[in-house]
Image: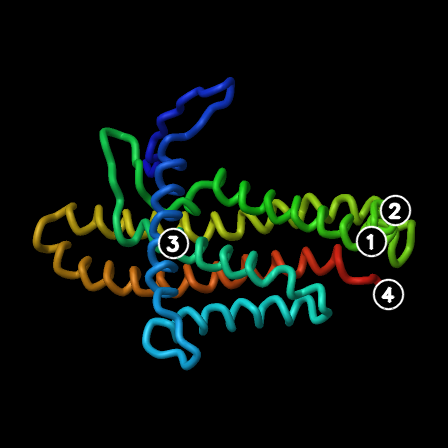
Amino acid sequence: MFDDGSKIVKLFGLSFNVGNCVAGLVTAIIVCAVLIWLSRNLQMKPTGKQNILEWIVDFTNGIVKSAIPSAQGSNYGLLAFLLFVFIFVANQLGLIIQFVIGDVTYIKSPTASPMTTLTLAFMVLVISHIAGVNRFGFKGYVKNTFLSPMPVLFPIKILEQFTNFITLALRLYGNIYAGEVLLKLVFQMAQSHGILTFIPAMPLEMIWQGFSVFIGAIQAYVFVTLAMVYISQKVEKEA
């Protein structure tokens, strides 16, 4: 009932979901445009839109410092900033516009697709392991990540990598997808019996959209926080 359908295109032997690609591209364009606008005419004493940019930078730097208090944390400020801004905009995109042709939705929240959130989570997983190797060398990374504090925990440490990856992706996907499903239900209710359902459904739709903005911001914060925690597990020395 809530399947938006999909248009799959094969290129170089790989399958691409056009809707996911278009939604992700639109999100990236919006993020680039907003950040370029916010960063124009920077001044030593910030005013107006520069305050917004610096507040976001300070906010994401705070997330990094809380997870990686050592000097290593300075290496991941930009990653945390870009992740937060991209995921926040991606979470809100489906609330602003949905572009549907036939049975296929080409523009919606990219994070309402598990493939997008799994990709983001996999990127964080790969970065965290590369960071661990760069920090300690391969042998030191293996010892710090998988054999500390006791080698007997090695199987659990391996399993932990998979559970971290899956939970990071599905937590974001589940919250955003559920929000969009509820919005569709309210919209369908508004259309079901004319004016009798339209009047009560509209305030409910606006209230839930406002709540969805809040949920989208919280989920962006949670994703970035957990990403930094996972990276810290690879670059911080285990006791």
In the displayed structure, would residue 8 be above or below residue 89?
Answer: above
Q: Amino acid at mark 1?
A: Phe
Q: Secondary structure at mark 3?
A: helix
Q: CA distance from mark 1 to mark 2?
A: 7 Å
Other residues around mark 2 within 10 Å, as few (<14) / some (14–19) / many (≥20): few
Residue linked to disc 3: 31
Residue 230 spot, x, y in % from top left:
68, 56
Q: Amino acid at mark 4?
A: Ala
**Residue sitting at x 40%, y 75%:** 43
Pointer 1 and pointer 2: residues touching (CB < 8 Å)? Answer: yes
Pointer 4 and pointer 3: residues touching (CB < 8 Å)? Answer: no
Q: Amino acid at mark 2?
A: Lys
Other residues around mark 1 within 10 Å, as few (<14) / some (14–19) / many (≥20): some
Q: Which mark is residue 136?
A: 1
Say which quadrant the N terminus sits in.
top left
Residue 210 spot, x, y in % from top left:
30, 65
Q: Nearer the viewer, mark 1 or mark 4?
A: 1
Q: CA distance from mark 3 to mark 2?
A: 39 Å
Seen as rendered, the residue at the extreme left is 195
Q: Secondary structure at mark 1?
A: helix
Pointer 4 and pointer 2: residues touching (CB < 8 Å)? Answer: no
